[in-house]
Amino acid sequence: MKYSGVITTGISGRVSDIPALLHRKSIREYGIHPRETAPGEARNFNVVVSPLGAGEAKLEASRCLQCDEICNVCVSVCPNLANFSYSVDPVCYSLQKAVVDENGAVSIVNDIEFRVDQSFQVMNIRDLCNECGNCTTFCPSSGKPFQEKPGLCLSVKSLNEEQTGFLLNRQSGREVLIYKEKENIRTLTLTGGNYIYETSQVRAVLRPDDFTIMEMKLLAPCVREARFTFAAWMSIVMKGAIQLKLTH
Ligand code: SF4
Ligand code: SF4
């Protein structure tokens, strides 16, 4: 994956030169060994391990890999290259939802705020992952990347074999992200500058820059509420799948 330029990440607000940071992560820099009193000379109350000098302390601090800016440990430790890192612009959408009253009247009302603060995201490519668990062992946040990150399938066959997964279908002028969870299917289609979100219960046209509902139709009489948090999350996954350029 290619990162270009200087990017601000949402978590810390710091501005980092991401290409330089990734380069630094690829080189092993050993730490400074502090001076220690020889075992035979330590029979007193003097300091045994000397503190670092100012210059040494700065050098030691410069080895920090700034995992809060970009971690990607699960990407680098995977022996099958099954974890993929991608970047998105942070987003904040004031989502809307549709509610149906007892008379069957539909209203569009404000729902929750949907935020993605971190620029760097990770997805798991299901076709390449053999679930060895290595990424879980190394994740510094005690995560289970291969289970918790969105799982992208590279073909209909592999999607059919998975209980849960995503597949990006790219046609002329439209990108369709399919999400399968057991037998349920949801799709998010980017076409004509808008998203179309479709489930068994709702079809809605959503504006990509703020996720405002432009058109909406409830597809089953029993539906009392339709929310679009999952559609917003799918839009983030779609950006990653498009960057991966592996489509069906
Ligand atoms: S569990 Fe999957 S993603 Fe994680 S290290 Fe193993 S193969 Fe890679
Ligand atoms: S899932 Fe864990 S290892 Fe992977 S980027 Fe996030 S914190 Fe790092």
Image: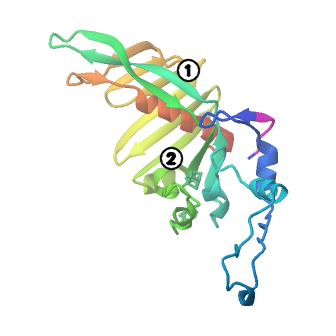
Q: Amino acid at mark 2?
A: Pro
Q: Residue at x 20, y 25 (%)?
A: 222
Q: Mark 2 falls on what kind of element? A: loop
The x and y percentages for residue 4 are 80, 38
- Helix, strand or loop status at disc 1: loop
Q: Nearer the viewer, residue 107 or 75?
A: 75
Residue at image point 51% right, 67% down: 133
Instruction: Let me know if residue 203 is in the magenta part.
Output: no
The answer to whether the residues at label 1 and label 2 have Cβ atoms under 8 Å apart is no
Looking at the picture, how far across and down is residue 31, in whole percent?
A: 77, 66
How many residues crowd around disc 1 within 10 Å: few (fewer than 14), some, or many (20 or more)? some
- Say whether residue 10 is left or right of residue 218: right
Q: Residues within 10 Å of mark 2 (few under 14, many from 20)?
A: many
Residues shaded magenta = 2-6
Label 1, label 2: how far apart the Cα atoms are? 20 Å
Q: Is residue 3 magenta?
A: yes
Q: Residue tagged by mark 2?
A: 150
- Left or right, 99 with respect to 214, comes to left
Question: Residue 27, image x and y in percent?
Answer: 81, 61
Amino acid type for the residue under numbered disc 1? Pro
Q: What residue would you read off at disc 1?
A: 208
In this view, the residue in front, 16 or 42, is 42
Residue 110 sits above or below residue 49 on the image: above
